[in-house]
Image (tube, helix red, strand yellow):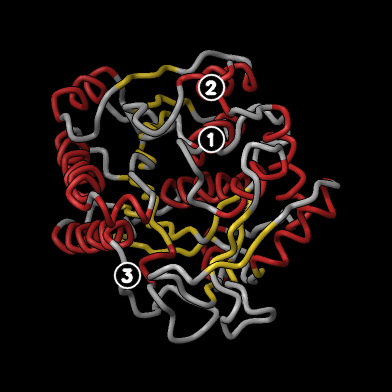
């Protein structure tokens, strides 16, 4: 049976980026099946996506390391491709539990690829990360920049990239589009879905918003002696809905190729960096909330500056980020203030 060009399997589709991408996929005319083990996500996110798009989404609870469970899904559906978000992503946790990260992120991806090959589904959009660049030698970072990692999370993404490269070399049928995200922030404009970290947030923007909503007392800024505009770390923050659209554009690109592209790494970022203090100031200005903060020592493994060259995404996919830091702050605050306890209060 020929694969349905409109049907996409979204692994990890209940997560932060996955849930926003499901909305973008629906708006672009794709049918979605979500496969997620809910280890770091909530079924409530799927319910809210269903309500935002006005139709139920098929959801299968399962683990990407479970080949039999995946085979059942691939037997029941003819997929055009897979968008693969199902990965653990906390740097600190990866240092404490490296085997868990390699098992889920690396072994899980191998199992998924094996099942895709069995069912002749050869279009994959992989959720990689700018962490594969480590401490960059030059800025902005382009796709041919040297790759090296400072923690098991980044290392697990880099190992998968090498696996995808080797797979593309061994079999010319694959479209393996490898999206390296910079720092996703923000939320859907409805305020219905957003980032809902378990426990204390690992990332800056949800930490700021939880301080603003009174859930946390103050923000710790790790290091104010970096060689940057104000001594705090500089990152390339990208709105999650821009990021979601990048996945749709990557699928469209795969769809329109007359010959498979093999392994294709593409940065998704805005192309400019903002410092921690600039983000804190912008958030306070946009929301009218005070953000108490204190400087503490640098964190091990943190780097001074990291921002993307997004030229390749524009040239190949016709994609570019359109949301500003103001949009990112306003949308984050709308989500956080409407859902002070995330999905849990639902």
Quick one: label 2, few (<14), some, or many (20+) residues within 10 Å?
A: few
In the picture, which quadrant includes the N terminus?
top left
Indicate whether 260 appears above or below 45: below
Indicate whether 42 appears above or below 202: above
Looking at the image, tell me whether mark 1 or mark 3 is earlier in sequence order.
Answer: 3
Quick one: label 3, few (<14), some, or many (20+) residues within 10 Å?
A: some
Q: Quadrant of residue 36?
A: top left
Badge 2 vs badge 1, beta-carbon distance below 8 Å: yes
Which circle marks residue 344 in the picture? 2
Q: Quadrant of residue 156?
A: bottom left
In the picture, which quadrant includes the C terminus?
top right
Residue annotated with mark 3: 150
Residue annotated with mark 1: 196
240 left or right, relative to 191: left
46 left or right, relative to 168: right
- Find residue 241 and report its horizontal and vertical position in percent: 62, 44
Quick one: label 1, few (<14), some, or many (20+) residues within 10 Å?
A: many
- Find residue 19 and report its horizontal and vertical position in percent: 52, 33
Indicate whether 137 appears above or below 257: below
Residue drawn 77% across the image and 45% down it:
330
Indicate whether 118 appears above or below 208: above
Q: Nearer the viewer, residue 189 or 26?
A: 189
Looking at the image, tell me whether mark 2 or mark 1 is earlier in sequence order.
Answer: 1
In three-dimensional space, the C-alpha distance between marks 1 and 3, rounded to whole angstroms, equals 25 Å
Q: Secondary structure at mark 1?
A: loop
- Find residue 317 and report its horizontal and vertical position in percent: 54, 58
């Amino acid at each position: 049976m020929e694969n349905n060009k409109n049907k996409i399997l979204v692994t990890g589709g209940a997560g932060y980026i996955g849930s926003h991408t499901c909305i973008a996929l629906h708006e672009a005319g794709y049918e979605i099946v979500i496969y997620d083990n809910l280890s770091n996500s909530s079924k409530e996110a799927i319910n809210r996506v269903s309500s935002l798009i006005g139709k139920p989404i098929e959801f299968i609870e399962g683990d990407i390391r479970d080949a039999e469970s995946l085979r059942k899904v691939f037997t029941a559906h003819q997929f055009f491709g897979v968008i693969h978000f199902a990965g653990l992503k906390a740097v600190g946790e990866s240092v404490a539990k490296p085997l868990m990260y390699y098992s889920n992120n690396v072994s899980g991806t191998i199992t998924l690829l094996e099942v895709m090959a069995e069912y002749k589904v050869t279009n994959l959009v992989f959720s990689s990360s700018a962490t594969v660049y480590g401490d960059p030698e030059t800025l902005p970072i382009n796709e041919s920049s040297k790759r090296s990692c400072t923690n098991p999370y980044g290392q697990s993404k880099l190992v998968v990239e090498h696996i995808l490269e080797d797979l593309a070399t061994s079999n010319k049928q694959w479209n393996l589009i490898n999206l390296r995200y910079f720092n996703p922030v923000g939320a859907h404009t409805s305020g219905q879905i957003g980032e809902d970290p378990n426990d204390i947030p690992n990332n800056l923007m949800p930490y700021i918003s939880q301080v603003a909503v009174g859930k946390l007392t103050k923000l710790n800024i790790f290091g104010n002696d970096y060689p940057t505009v104000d001594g705090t770390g500089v990152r390339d923050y990208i709105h999650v809905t821009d990021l979601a659209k990048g996945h749709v554009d990557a699928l469209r690109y795969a769809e329109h190729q007359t010959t498979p592209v093999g392994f294709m790494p593409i940065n998704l970022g805005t192309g400019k960096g903002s410092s921690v203090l600039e983000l804190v100031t912008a958030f306070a200005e946009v929301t009218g909330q005070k953000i108490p903060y204190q400087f503490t020592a640098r964190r091990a493994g943190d780097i001074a500056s990291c921002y993307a060259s997004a030229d390749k995404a524009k040239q190949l996919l016709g994609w570019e980020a359109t949301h500003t830091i103001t949009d990112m702050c306003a949308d984050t605050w709308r989500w956080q203030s409407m859902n002070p306890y995330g999905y849990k209060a639902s």
